[in-house]
Amino acid sequence: MTTHVEPLVGGPSLPQQRKIVTEVPGPRSREILARKTSAVARGVGISLPVFTDVAGGGVLVDVDGNSFIDLGTGIAVTGVGNAAPRVVEAVQRQVERFTHTCFMITGYDSYVDVAEALNRLTPGDHEKRSALFNTGAEAVENAVKIARSYTGRQAVIAFEHAYHGRTNLTMALTAKAMPYKSGFGPFAPEIYRAPLSYPYRDGLSGPEAAKRAIAMIEKQVGAASTAAILIEPIQGEGGFIVPAPGFLEALVDWARENGVVFIADEVQTGFARTGAMFASEHEGIVPDLVVTAKGIAGGLPLAGVTGRAEMMDAPHVGGLGGTYGGNPLACAAALAAIETYEVDDLAGRARDIEMLMKTRLTALQAGDPRIGDVRGRGAMIAIELVDPATGDPDPALTGRVAAASHAAGVIILTCGTYGNVIRFLPPLSIDDALLHEGLDVVAHALEES
Ligand code: PMP
């Protein structure tokens, strides 16, 4: 008698378990990988070469039936969990109504709903406006356009270890050459790089680090030429670097005193990820413009710029936009994701995740001097791996730990200017047991590496 096997479905009904049934990657993934190599440009890399069949919550099942614990969330995107129920339902409803009009041609209210939600949720109770785009990089570019239009100035200050995207302007804003910039110049002009606050490596207080950055800006650029300061409140790709207290506040004060627009790139830190709706809140700062993407729409491509009404309204009518920006499917997904963050108090959950992870990782650090630093906020936590004798970054060890974790069924990502940071970006909906199991696997991988 043959038994009928139901095909797996993603979403909430997917068993939240780790289960490895083949080597990783398995035979089916290897087959697709071979096709990928001959069909897809090699510049589009893949860090864990398994191909997804279904995903749901905090688990991803590949085409060989391996079930992975997802501590990467597609780089901080599926904060509400993969194929989150409200998101799936909202997208299904919308796709049957209409798929596209182009908001610049004929409007729809869900775009306005998302703008209102962003205006309400971002820090500060001043009058705000929002504009929607497709990707983080596109939104960062538009924030720069808005700041230049408002100030009539050109220079933009970005920071060491920054990551803002891969388009021409955002490559210029991004700090790291390999793999993001090498060979892709020339880059956009009028971008200047200031020193960051990196407490583990520079030992400076926030005000000291800010003084150093401001001195550089004043000497090398000049406030009168500066349109904007652009910074991630906690750096993402650069290594989950949390600046020393007071650093961001001093930069905001200086920007205000000098008519410079302060732009917070909250693409990776936004939407409850750090234990607050936006990471700027931890530092008590109110940015002039906030850039959002990733977690905003539970996996659909959407990004936004939100900020002071007088700045956002500076560009002329028709000066901002694009064919797909604020696509109706993405807006429906965003409204459902935002409802989920708020109703399920996922910022509170992110704070619990921080406690759990920091407790475990600092205990691990106590017995392993290769863990130089444990840092981050909420469900955005990292360990920096170093040579204990010298404190030098150890990217080779980092790579081995990531590979061993992948082979054992846990998706983790690495980051950092020196490639020596393991970052954890679990879905905020993950339960403690699955998170503990994921950390057990990483701890074991570290021990064996
Ligand atoms: N800014 C930050 C802080 C990011 O982390 C990223 C993506 N990793 C971007 C901008 C670019 O976003 P996207 O990949 O959607 O263009």
Image: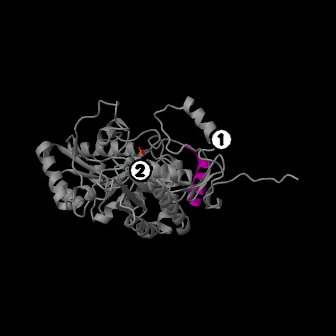
Q: Position of residue 399 (x, y in %)?
A: 44, 47
- The numbered mark, 2 or 1, whose residue comes first in the sequence reads 1
Q: Which residue is mark 2?
A: 397
- What's the residue type where badge 1 is placed? Arg
Whether 270 is drawn above or below 328: the answer is: below
Near mark 1 (Cα within 10 A), the count class, few <14, some 14-19 or many ≥20, is: some
- What's the residue type where badge 2 is placed? Leu
Query: Which residues make up the magenta segment?
Result: 83-99
In this image, 246 relative to 98: left or right?
left
Residue 267 seen from this side = no
Which numbered dot is residue 28? 1
Q: Position of residue 264 (x, y in %)?
A: 31, 53
Between the residue at mark 2 and the residue at mark 1, the CA separation in whole angstroms equals 29 Å
Q: Nearer the viewer, residue 99 or 75?
A: 75
Q: Residue at x 46, y 58 (%)?
A: 447
Q: Nearer the viewer, residue 361 or 109?
A: 361
